[in-house]
Amino acid sequence: MSGTRIASLDFLRGVAVMGILVANLPAFALPRAAYFSPLAWGGTAPADIAVWFATFVLVEGKLRGLFSFLFGASLLLVIDRACDDAAGVHFRRMAVLFAIGCAHLYLVWWGDILAHYALVGALAYMARRLSVRWLVALGLGVLAWTWIGDVVGTAILWRSAARATPAMVATWDAFAASFGVPPRPALLAEIAATRGDWADALAWRWRHATGPLVSLTVVGPETMSAVLLGMAGYRSGFLTGTWPRARYRRWAVACLAPSLIGYAILGLATLAHGFDQRWVFLGSVGASPPLRTLGFVGYAALLVPLAGDGWWTARVAAAGRAAFTNYLATSVLMTAIFYGWGLGQFAAWPRATLTALVPIAWAGMLLWSKPWLDRRRYGPLEWLWRSLARGRPQPMRYADRSRPPAGA
């Protein structure tokens, strides 16, 4: 398998891995429930609420969706280039990704997405020969199925608000664990475990982190939808930059306008209702699947024409070529700041203050990735993934500096 890099995929992947950091900051630094609701932890000062609102409208779900979208494109790219051993290459890659993801989940941070991608990617192999039309139809069908389930969940939560029976109380409290304000003892237990030593945090993750198989049943369909649409985006030329610029502009406006306006309305409604967990759930889950999909497709349409040879786009594209390394390195850096094995700052910073870490982490990604990849074919963990999947060490340095790097 060989070939030249696809600049638009690298650039989009770089934007996605940088944007995911913004979305994940509360999950690194605050109790899990604070990811969705500022009432759980992290402060409700005007600056904290402004950061929550901006993140909700511009980032939440959409950058993760963009990453899933690109994962589908890369998956199909590798399968197409594998030729005679497509199944072997694909499933070895997914097996190694699953192992690395599980290590990340339990040994480093509870918010891992890699093991989940590995399971979804293994299933997506069945769609490799579908046409663009069928990939889009299947992706949208799975999205509709996901949305129906989310609407049903919203109705169950709304009904439980009366708390007239023990069952309703249990349902309300179960939703509060993620979308409301959990009991204070539960919050303090999570904080104590995370601020403790590495073994304490590992024990807490083992008991409370959502395992890959559970994630597959809960969020797997929406991820699969994005992966299938990404396969269609690659096969149609949308993600590889072959469409006319005017067409990309039309798609960007048509997708981003309803997505961002819809999220703004949901965010304002959540604020107006004082972060009542019903409205938090409605905004982040019940009403948002189609808005998220429009959002990441719109971002892709906006960004693909920007991929090129400029200084900053080259830096972002290099960060995208090393997205696997940058994603995992971000987890190590952030847990070193917030977890007990490092500086132990978990639950100590207000939400607004966390944003100070964004330019620092972005600068790190942009400064190291390009110089490294100017001399080497892969990022460090990309090399490890590729070598383990192929069962032998892969050449890291270029044999001929005049040749472009091998395909992703």
Image (tube, grey):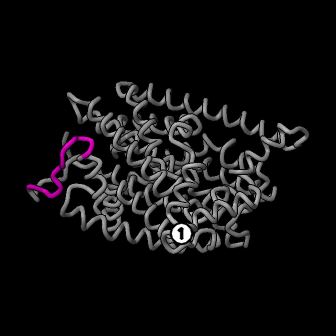
Which quadrant, please, contains the N terminus?
top left
- Tell me: residue 400, above or below residue 122: below
Circle 1 residues within 10 Å: few <14, some 14–19, many ≥20:
many
- Tell me: residue 224, above or below residue 109: above
Q: Residue at the right extreme? A: 164
Q: Is residue 375 left or right of residue 297?
A: left
Q: Is residue 11 visible?
A: no
Q: Which residues are magenta?
A: 388-399
Q: Nearer the viewer, residue 186 or 149?
A: 186
Q: Where does the image place residue 385, in percent across and percent down from the top left?
A: 29, 48
Q: Is residue 290 left or right of residue 82?
A: right
Count of all numbered marks drawn on residues in the image: 1
Which quadrant would residue 306 be assigned to in this image?
A: bottom left
What residue is drawn where x is 28% and y is 58%?
Answer: 380
Q: Find disc 1 in the rendering and name its residue.
A: 340
Q: Secondary structure at mark 1?
A: loop
What residue is drawn where x is 48% and y is 52%?
Answer: 106
What residue is drawn where x is 49% and y is 65%?
Answer: 335
Three-letter residue code for mark 1: Gly
Q: Nearer the viewer, residue 28 or 14?
A: 28
Which quadrant would residue 127 be assigned to in this image?
A: top left
Q: Where does the image place residue 289, in percent across and percent down from the top left?
A: 61, 41
Q: Is residue 251 visible?
A: yes
- Tell me: residue 262, above or below residue 85: below
Q: Is residue 317 left or right of residue 254?
A: left
- Tell me: residue 263, above or below residue 226: below
Q: Where does the image place residue 67, in percent across and percent down from the top left?
A: 45, 48
Which quadrant would residue 171 be assigned to in this image?
A: top right
Q: Where does the image place residue 165, in percent across and percent down from the top left?
A: 89, 38
Q: Residue at the left extreme? A: 400
**In magenta segment, residue 192:** no
**In magenta segment, residue 389:** yes
